[in-house]
Image (spheres, rainbow, N blue to C red):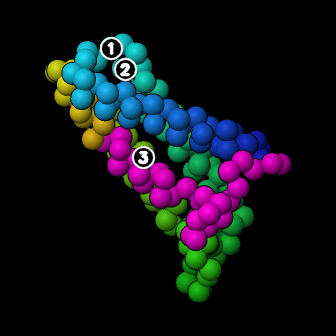
Amino acid sequence: MYASFLFLHSATRWALLISLLYAIGRGIAGWAGRRPFTRHDNLVRHLTATMAHVQLLIGYVLYFQSPLIAYFRSHVKATLPFEFRFFGWIHVLLMTVAVILLTIGSAAAKRQETDLRRFRTMTIWFVPALLLIMMAIPWPFSPLAHRPYIRMF
């Protein structure tokens, strides 16, 4: 079961990043171009937040089943390599905060009265969420933790 969640997590993380970049692009274009907030824009806003929630739930399942995290929790007071601390605290905390920002931004954008304010609100909240996600991803080139772009099982 852990392997199936790991595969699902690997597949959906790229969809979330693409969706978030697309939502931000539409937000900036709508904000700068003063165009109407269409049904498609609303769908993009909603699906991006929904994908973030699904990804976070999958991440929590993996977090609490991970042997790496189990080792971290049992040795939390010991001096551990930074990669253990990255996955034990930093990664999960930053990803949770990013999804909270996306949720607030999505809900706030939905409740705005003008199209310009919808685009502006969505962009203002989604950009910091994207930055947090980008910081929390264990990129292959990262000095914090190393993971391949796509894991082969």
Determine whether label 2 and label 1 are within 8 Å by CB.
Answer: yes
Determine whether label 3 and label 1 are within 8 Å by CB.
Answer: no
- The amino acid at mark 3 is Leu
- The answer, for residue 107, to whether it is visible in the render is no
Tell me which numbered mark, 3 or 1, is placed earlier along the sequence. Answer: 1
Tell me, yes or no, whether the highlighted magenta stretch contains residue 129.
yes
**Above or below, comparing residue 3 to residue 118 in the picture:** below
Q: Residue at x 59, y 86 (%)?
A: 78
Q: Residue at x 28, y 24 (%)?
A: 30
- The amino acid at mark 1 is Thr
Q: Is residue 25 left or right of residue 125?
A: right
Determine whether label 3 and label 2 are within 8 Å by CB.
Answer: no
Instruction: Name the residue that disc number 3 marks.
Output: 130
| Circle 2 residues within 10 Å: few <14, some 14–19, many ≥20 | some
Tell me which numbered mark, 3 or 2, is placed earlier along the sequence. Answer: 2
| Circle 3 residues within 10 Å: few <14, some 14–19, many ≥20 | many
Q: Residue at x 65, y 64 (%)?
A: 146
- Where is residue 152 drawn, in percent x and y? 80, 48
* Magenta stretch bounds: 125-153
- Where is residue 109 drawn, in percent x and y? 27, 29
Tally of numbered discs: 3
- Where is residue 43 drawn, in percent x and y? 42, 19
Q: Quadrant of the N terminus?
A: top right
> Which secondary structure lies at badge 2?
helix
Cα distance between the residues tagged 2 and 1: 5 Å
Instruction: Name the residue that disc number 2 marks.
Output: 41
> Which secondary structure lies at badge 1?
loop
Q: Is residue 133 left or right of residue 3?
A: left
Instruction: Name the residue that disc number 1 marks.
Output: 38
- The amino acid at mark 2 is Asp
Residue 30 or 146: which is nearer the viewer? 30
